[in-house]
Image (tube, rainbow, N blue to C red):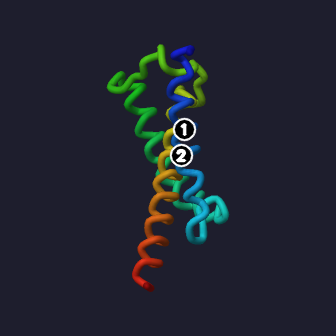
């Protein structure tokens, strides 16, 4: 396997593993606008933080494990996706656990 795809593959696996959690409760992907309002503002803050840290040479990436595709400001594609994918997985997990706990309380 080409090491340059590892970060993207890992993010894809995170989405794949948490995708079945969409079946619990009101879902996350079924409420895309709400999910976007929860994820995108926070992602923007962290992307700015990343851009500043990269520019200041405080933060860097191992280029062996990223595709080399960068989005402006120069931030690896994988890092941009990280700030969207991981919170989505967290929302899916939170929604599913909340739904299951509510079901168990009703019994």
Residue 73 visible? The answer is: no
Q: On the image, which quarter does residue 56 sit in?
A: top left
Mark count? 2
Question: Height in image: 64 above or below 84?
Answer: above
- As drawn, the label of residue 17 is 2
- Tag 1 secondary structure: helix
Q: Residue at x 36, y 26 (%)?
A: 59
Residue sitting at x 47%, y 58%: 93
Looking at the image, which residue sits at the far bottom?
Answer: 106
What residue lies at 49% left-to-right and 72% top-to-bottom? 99
Residue at the extreme front of the image, as rendered: 107
Q: Residues within 10 Å of mark 1 (few under 14, many from 20)?
A: few
In the picture, the quarter occupied by the N terminus is: top right
Residue beneath label 1, please? 13
Q: Which one is nearer the viewer's eye here, 20 or 58?
A: 20
Residue 81 location (% of width, % of height): 55, 38
Specify whether residue 24 is in view: yes
The reply to whether dot 2 and dot 1 touch (C-beta < 8 Å) is yes
What is the quadrant of the C terminus in the image?
Answer: bottom left
Q: Position of residue 90 (x, y in %)?
A: 46, 54
Q: Secondary structure at mark 2?
A: helix
Return the x and y of residue 75 as percentages of the image width and height: 52, 29
Q: Residue at x 56, y 66 (%)?
A: 24
Residue 52 vertical placement versus 43 (above, below): above
Distance of label 2 from label 1 (alpha carbons): 6 Å
Residue 41 appears left or right of 26: left
Residue 71 image-quadrant placement: top right
Neighbor class of circle 2 (other Cα within 10 Å; few <14, some 14-19, many 20+) is: few
Residue 44 numbered tag: none
């Amino acid at each position: 396997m080409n090491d340059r795809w590892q970060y993207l593959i890992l993010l894809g696996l995170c989405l794949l593993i948490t995708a079945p959690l969409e079946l619990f409760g009101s879902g996350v992907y079924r409420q895309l606008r709400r999910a976007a309002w929860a994820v995108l503002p926070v992602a923007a803050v962290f992307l700015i933080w990343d851009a500043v840290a990269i520019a200041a040479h405080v933060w860097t990436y191992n280029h062996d494990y990223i595709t080399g595709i960068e989005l402006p400001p120069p931030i690896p594609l994988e890092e941009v996706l990280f700030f969207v994918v991981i919170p989505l997985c967290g929302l899916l997990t939170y929604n599913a656990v909340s739904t299951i706990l509510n079901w168990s309380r009703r019994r």
